[in-house]
Image (cartoon, rainbow, N blue to C red):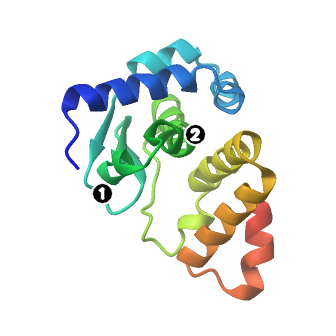
């Protein structure tokens, strides 16, 4: 399914607008002491990725496959709640966030934990606590967290 750049930008504009209205995202911007109006200036685009979303050098990249979702704006918002944390970490901290989604230590990385915590809070508030729990379970499975460590890691995330 091919979506024009104009349509992609309209979707991203909707994401930006809804982002500025979301309580979870507003809280994280407040925590970093950044005006939510800065969201208008955050570079975002779609790309062929091996993950759903990624933030590199202050740019949010969303997997092009998300455009195929029946409600791409809502799906992207869920991932942006995580990636905006990385944007804030990268642009207000001492350097880039470290790690790769393939890293064994991915779920041990404090920057990733903060992103996941914000994302699960977003899912819990906008969908349900049960959906947030399912999402975390799926991620723990995806990252092959040993059964003996799952409960503790789930609490972290």
Q: Is residue 157 visible?
A: no
The residue carrying mark 2 is 81
> From the viewer's perspective, is 53 left or right of 34?
left
Image position, residue 87 (x, y; %): 47, 35
Asked if residue 20 lies left or right of residue 132, the reply is left
Location of the C terminus (image quadrant)? bottom right
Q: What element carries label 2?
A: helix
With 32 as the anchor, is 40 left or right in this view? left
Mark 1 lies on a secondary structure that is: loop
Figure quadrant of residue 136: bottom right
Vertical comparison of 37 with 19: above or below: above
Q: Quadrant of residue 18?
A: top right
Q: Earlier in the sequence, mark 2 or mark 1?
A: 1
Q: Residues within 10 Å of mark 1 (few under 14, many from 20)?
A: few
**Point 23% across, 25% down: residue:** 6
Which residue sits furthest front? Answer: 70
At x 38%, y 29%, the residue is 12
Q: Closest to the observer: 91 or 37? A: 37
Q: Is residue 66 above or below residue 40?
A: below
In the displayed structure, 82 sits above or below 92; it is below
Residue that label 1 marks = 49
Question: Does the CB distance between marks 2 and 1 fall below 8 Å?
Answer: no
What residue do we see at 27% from left, 29% from top? 7
Of residue 42 and residue 32, the one placed in the foreground of this image is: 42
The x and y percentages for residue 152 are: 80, 72
From this view, report whether residue 131 is shown above or below residue 118. Answer: below
């Amino acid at each position: 399914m091919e979506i024009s750049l104009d349509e992609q930008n309209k979707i991203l504009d909707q994401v930006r607008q809804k982002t500025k209205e979301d309580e979870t995202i507003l809280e994280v911007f407040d925590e970093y002491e950044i005006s939510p109006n800065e969201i208008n200036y955050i570079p975002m685009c779609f790309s062929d990725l091996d993950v759903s979303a990624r933030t590199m050098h202050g740019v949010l990249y969303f997997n092009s496959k998300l455009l195929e979702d029946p409600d791409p704006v809502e799906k992207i918002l869920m991932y942006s709640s995580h990636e905006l944390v990385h944007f804030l970490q990268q642009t207000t901290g001492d350097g880039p966030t470290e790690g790769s989604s393939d890293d064994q230590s991915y779920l041990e990385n404090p920057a990733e934990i903060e992103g996941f915590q914000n994302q699960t809070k977003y899912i819990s508030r906008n969908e349900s606590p049960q959906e947030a729990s399912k999402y975390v379970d799926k991620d723990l499975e995806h990252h092959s967290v040993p059964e003996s460590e799952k409960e503790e890691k789930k609490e972290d995330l």
